[in-house]
Image (spheres, rainbow, N blue to C red):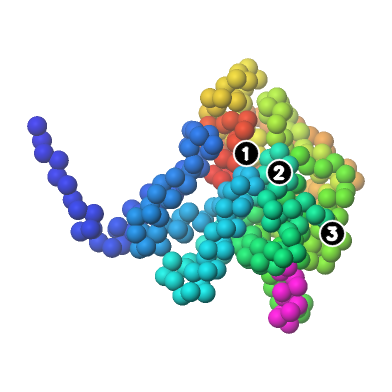
């Protein structure tokens, strides 16, 4: 029987040890399990408890993609920001600036509005108590608006409105308010999800304010899940476009280049029980539309895009300068409950 040679981790070169830690801390967004069954941040959270040095090494991996799927996770994240503020004020070596390390952020609370005491439904869906609003929004806004990729549910839109308002007022207060200064956000890709409205008032929360209209004008890429709950919608050979596209103020998206619409490749004979409980391994088809197709023809946006010729994983089909389709190289375990989160985290 051969002896197993053990090599002490502490004898590794520092650079190699850090690479191993960073790799081990990467969230497992492509896991087969439901996120509710196994937290994709599990390894990173465990490593953060090893030591201060290990914590500092792995936190950037944990923070790269922030997935807040319900009000409880939003509460915990805001609480973590409060703790970081205390660490900063006390000069603690546990302090770490989150904003530069967050690249993607998902805040989509299924089933309704946030309900914590500090995020009450008055008068906006996410308006905070007067005594707490400046603190919470001042902590959350820099993180939410620094992420280049931001995903929001339509029911979360008021949270964005609050953060934009805070950032805009702070910009004016610091006298950084000329036409040549960059906006107080870094958002390039905006993903909208969950129960999209088919009438205009939701958009007006943004288009009717200077900060909201400037925000929309700066977006380069727009993405959405075409359907959320109806699994039968995923198996059509044609690509039905979201109804909210008909009421979207496309003229407000002055910098928009592309619109991404992901569709899971699920066979018509799929078992509904498997979709809900065990998952289906599925490749994802990413339909890309040019902004000009929508912005320049907003009075005749198509209801659907005809099916493409069959293409395999990793292949791309270009129908025109305005429409193209690409199939993902790898597949994900698709569940009705969190399939879209996986697509966003892994592929968008």
Q: Quadrant of the N terminus?
A: top left
The magenta-colored residue range is 166-176
Residue under pointer 2:
193
First reached walking from the N terminus: tag 1 or tag 2 = 2
From this view, report whether residue 321 is shown above or below residue 87: above
Q: Main secondary structure of the magenta part?
A: helix
First reached walking from the N terminus: tag 3 or tag 2 = 2
Tell me where residue 68 appears, x and y as whole percent: 60, 48
Dot 1 and dot 2 residues touching (CB under 8 Å): yes
Whole-number angstrom distance, CA of label 1 to CA of label 3:
27 Å
**Residue at the image point whose x is 41% and y is 46% from the top:** 43
Asked whether the viewer can see residue 300, the reply is yes
Q: Can you tell which quarter of the image residue 168 is in?
A: bottom right
Tell me where residue 283 appears, x and y as whole percent: 56, 33
Sort mark 3 into few (<14), some (14-19) or many (20+) by Cα contacts within 10 Å.
some
From this view, report whether residue 170 is shown above or below residue 191: below
Q: Is residue 338 magenta?
A: no
Whole-number angstrom distance, CA of label 3 to CA of label 2:
19 Å
In depth, the one of 145 and 327 nearer the eye is 145
Q: Can you tell which quarter of the image residue 323 is in?
A: top right
Circle 3 sits in a helix, a strand or a loop, which is it?
helix
Whole-number angstrom distance, CA of label 1 to CA of label 2:
9 Å
Residue under pointer 3:
207
């Amino acid at each position: 029987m051969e002896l197993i040679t053990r090599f002490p981790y502490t004898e590794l070169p520092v650079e190699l040890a850090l690479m191993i830690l960073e790799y081990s801390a990467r969230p497992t967004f492509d896991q087969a399990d439901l996120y509710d069954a196994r937290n994709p941040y599990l390894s990173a959270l465990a490593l953060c408890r090893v030591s201060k040095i290990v914590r500092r090494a792995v936190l950037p991996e944990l923070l790269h993609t922030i997935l807040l799927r319900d009000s409880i996770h939003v509460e915990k994240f805001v609480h973590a920001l409060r703790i970081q503020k205390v660490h900063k004020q006390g000069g603690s070596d546990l302090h770490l600036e989150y904003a530069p390390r967050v690249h993607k952020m998902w805040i989509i609370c299924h089933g309704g509005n946030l309900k914590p005491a500090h995020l009450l439904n008055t008068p906006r869906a996410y308006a905070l108590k007067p005594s707490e609003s400046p603190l919470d929004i001042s902590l959350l806004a820099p993180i939410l608006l620094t992420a280049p990729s931001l995903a929001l549910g339509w029911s979360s839109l008021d949270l964005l409105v609050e953060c934009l308002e805070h950032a805009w007022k702070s910009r004016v207060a610091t006298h950084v308010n000329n036409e040549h200064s960059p906006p107080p956000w870094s958002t390039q890709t905006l993903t909208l999800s969950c129960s999209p409205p088919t009438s205009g008032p939701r958009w007006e929360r943004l288009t009717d304010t200077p900060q909201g209209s400037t925000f929309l004008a700066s977006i380069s890429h727009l993405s959405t899940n075409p359907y959320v709950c109806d699994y039968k919608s995923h198996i059509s050979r044609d690509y039905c476009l979201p109804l909210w596209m008909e009421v979207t103020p496309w003229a407000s998206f002055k910098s928009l280049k592309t619109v991404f619409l992901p569709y899971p490749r699920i066979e018509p004979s799929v078992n509904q029980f498997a979709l809900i409980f065990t998952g289906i391994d599925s490749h994802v088809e990413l339909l890309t539309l040019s902004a000009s197709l929508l912005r320049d023809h907003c009075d005749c946006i198509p209801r659907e895009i005809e099916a493409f010729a069959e293409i395999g994983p990793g292949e791309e089909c270009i129908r025109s300068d305005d429409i193209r389709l690409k199939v993902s190289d790898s597949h994900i375990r698709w569940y009705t409950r969190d399939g879209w989160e996986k697509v966003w985290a892994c592929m968008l």
